Image (cartoon, grey):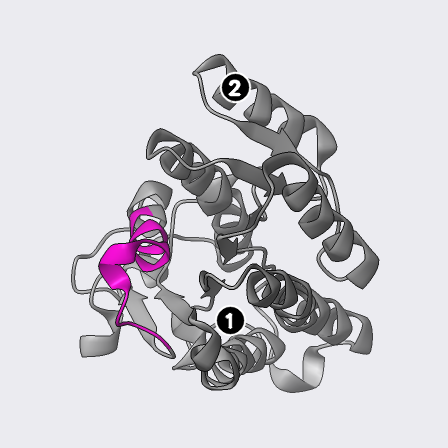
């Protein structure tokens, strides 16, 4: 199950997971893009379904999980990738509506996913792997608006708590701390600040990540190769955390 799958990192992850043999369940709000991606994967020989929904709505998330089980019989892994943020506002300039939107998508969205994915994995009795999307903003104040920084810190807290609560069931829960990535969301932020240079300057590699580079990290964490990795945050940030 991949959320935020209609574009950017989510779409890259869908293509990569499918290429590696996974049956993929795609969730996002934009039904047209989601269906187009699912059709592309099926045409390439993969098994994929598109289930439009909003991660901020618990019933939508529940429905997607139910569809995963109905179509494929189980849920073994999830990449809770959906997120949203903006830039260019100081704390006192952020309106309540923007605060609520950022916290809902980035925190409540992950919360809803965990609450509905984990019971299915427990019932299956074979464990599972969940990867939550955080950001360098989950460790540093990176120029994003304060609610986004707070939200991505919260994702790391939820990740650690869930890993602790469900380790005895063989469920691994990890997070990605992702640096600036060439996605439509970043394009919007760059328009706000006026230049990509301040964004790439924070990374040792002095460039943006490609969405597929992040997808590979998610795929590894979902695989058996990461069987002794849980409750942690893997940095895919071009070296931001080392500076």
Work out whether residue 67 or residue 108 is closer to the camera in this orientation and state it: 67
Q: Residue 11: horizontal and vertical position, in percent?
A: 49, 38
Residue depicted at x 61% and y 64%: 123
Q: Quadrant of residue 142?
A: bottom left
Determine which residue is flagged by label 2: 42
First in sequence: mark 1 or mark 2? 2
Q: Nearer the viewer, residue 102 or 88?
A: 102
**Image side of residue 32 versus residue 75, left or right:** right
Identify the main secondary structure in magenta.
helix
Q: Is residue 144 magenta?
A: no
Q: Secondary structure at mark 1?
A: loop
Q: Which residue is mark 1?
A: 144
Q: Residue at x 79, y 62 (%)?
A: 58
On the image, the x and y values in percent for residue 42 come to: 52, 19
Disc 1 and disc 2: Cα gap in Å? 37 Å
How many labels sit on residues?
Answer: 2
């Amino acid at each position: 199950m991949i959320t935020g799958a209609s574009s950017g990192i989510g779409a890259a992850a869908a293509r990569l997971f499918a290429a590696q043999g996974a049956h993929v369940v795609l969730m996002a709000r934009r039904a047209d893009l989601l269906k187009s991606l699912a059709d592309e994967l099926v045409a390439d020989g993969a098994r994929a379904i598109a289930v439009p929904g909003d991660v901020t709505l618990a019933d939508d998330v529940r429905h997607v999980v139910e569809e995963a089980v109905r179509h494929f019989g189980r849920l073994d892994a999830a990449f809770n990738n959906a997120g949203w943020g903006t830039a260019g506002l100081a704390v006192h300039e952020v309106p309540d509506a923007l605060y609520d939107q950022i916290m809902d998508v980035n925190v409540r969205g992950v919360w809803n996913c965990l609450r509905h994915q984990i019971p299915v994995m427990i019932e299956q009795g074979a464990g599972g792997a969940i990867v939550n999307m955080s950001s360098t903003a989950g460790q540093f104040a990176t120029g994003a608006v304060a609610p986004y920084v707070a939200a991505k810190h919260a994702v790391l807290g939820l990740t650690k708590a869930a890993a602790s609560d469900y380790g005895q069931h063989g469920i691994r829960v990890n997070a990605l701390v992702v640096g600036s990535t060439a996605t439509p969301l970043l394009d919007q932020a760059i328009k706000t600040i006026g230049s990509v240079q301040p964004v790439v300057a924070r990374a040792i590699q002095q460039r943006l990540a490609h969405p597929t580079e992040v997808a590979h990290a998610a795929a590894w964490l979902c695989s058996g190769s990461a069987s002794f990795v849980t409750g942690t945050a893997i940095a895919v940030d071009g070296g931001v955390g080392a500076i």
